[in-house]
């Protein structure tokens, strides 16, 4: 039995749902409301002491960290594989997913919170409740960063660097992608599935033109989002339309500043 503790718009949860869909695996949903601190409940922290999503539970045994979960699903359910057969290509695939964990995810958090979702906290919580939520974050680094982002928004000193890191991601993908092809080898892999949520997040922030300006990337984006597994993992019941509208609105308001930063 597979259970997935996840959130509809979490980039890390999205890639795990996508791989589950590509593998046509059945799973039980345990959706978590991050705004209401469900990820900090004692029951959930017993599964994932980091207090983040997703967590996969397979026959009662938890697996945490989305990149590790994807590798675990390959090990446990390898009949349909999304790892290249060639060992060098596998190393290249892992280099892409390592970048997600090392820098790209953190940059996406800075951009998403600093431009977009910091406003959502104020819409549904008092300042006292926001403080309580932030004080509950187990990781002190993320606790401090999120508090700073909510308070300073686009004035946060890390925002410019985060935007440039995401621009580099797009450039690297454009250079690596052959027209009509995939990031590694001749088939979709965990690398493509892992990078997609971060490209999609820029699109949701009203920066889809950054994708369209790169023809190989735009071709890849159109093909991967046309797959049935994408619709199952991202759309259907998992598209939070209000969340996306908020990101689009705040991204449009920040557009001039973002473009100036990228141009510089």
Image (cartoon, rainbow, N blue to C red):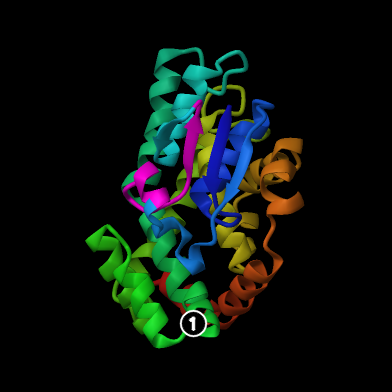
Q: Is residue 202 above or below residue 104?
A: below
Magenta range is: 43-59
Q: Which residue is mark 1?
A: 125
Residue 237: where, in percent of width, then height? 73, 52
Q: Quadrant of residue 64?
A: top left
> Is 48 covered by the magenta stretch?
yes
Q: Residue at x 32, y 75 (%)?
A: 147
Q: Residue furthest left?
A: 140
| Left or right of 46 on screen, residue 225 | right
Within 10 Å of the Cα at label 1, are there few (<14), some (14-19), or many (20+) other Cα atoms?
some
- Quarter of the figure that contains the C terminus: bottom left
Tell me how many marks there are: 1
Give residue 206's quadrant in the image: bottom right
From the viewer's perspective, tell me whether residue 220 is left or right of residue 36.
Answer: right
Residue at 57% of width from left, 30% of height from top?
2
* Residue 50 lies in the magenta-colored region: yes
Q: Secondary structure at mark 1?
A: loop
Q: Is residue 188 visible?
A: yes
**Compared to 142, does 70 lie above or below?**
above
Query: Is 47 placed above or below 51 here?
Result: above
> Of residues 150 and 131, which is closer to you in this image?
131
Q: Position of residue 101 (x, y in %)?
A: 36, 45
């Amino acid at each position: 039995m597979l259970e997935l503790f996840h959130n509809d718009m979490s980039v890390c949860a999205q890639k795990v749902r996508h791989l589950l869909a590509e593998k046509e695996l059945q799973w039980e949903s345990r959706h978590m409301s991050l705004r209401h601190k469900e990820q900090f409940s004692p029951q959930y922290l017993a599964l994932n002491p980091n207090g983040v999503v997703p967590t996969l539970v397979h026959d009662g045994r938890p697996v945490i960290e989305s990149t590790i979960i994807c590798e675990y699903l390959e090990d446990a359910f390898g009949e349909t594989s999304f790892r290249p057969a060639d060992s060098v290509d596998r190393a290249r695939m892992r280099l892409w997913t390592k970048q997600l964990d090392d820098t790209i995810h953190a940059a996406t958090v800075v951009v998403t919170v600093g431009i977009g979702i910091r406003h959502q906290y104020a819409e549904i919580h008092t300042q006292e409740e926001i403080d309580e939520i932030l004080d509950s974050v187990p990781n002190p680094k993320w606790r401090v960063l999120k508090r700073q982002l909510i308070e300073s928004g686009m004035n946060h000193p890390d925002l410019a660097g985060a935007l440039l890191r995401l621009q580099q991601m797009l450039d690297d993908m454009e250079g690596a992608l052959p027209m009509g092809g995939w990031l590694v080898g001749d088939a979709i892999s965990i690398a493509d599935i892992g990078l997609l949520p971060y490209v999609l997040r820029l699109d949701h922030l009203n920066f889809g033109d950054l994708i369209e300006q790169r023809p190989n990337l735009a071709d890849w984006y159109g093909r991967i989002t046309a797959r049935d597994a994408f619709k199952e993992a991202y759309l259907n019941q998992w598209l939070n339309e209000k969340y996306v509208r908020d990101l689009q609105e705040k991204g449009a308001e920040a557009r001039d500043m973002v473009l100036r930063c990228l141009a510089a």
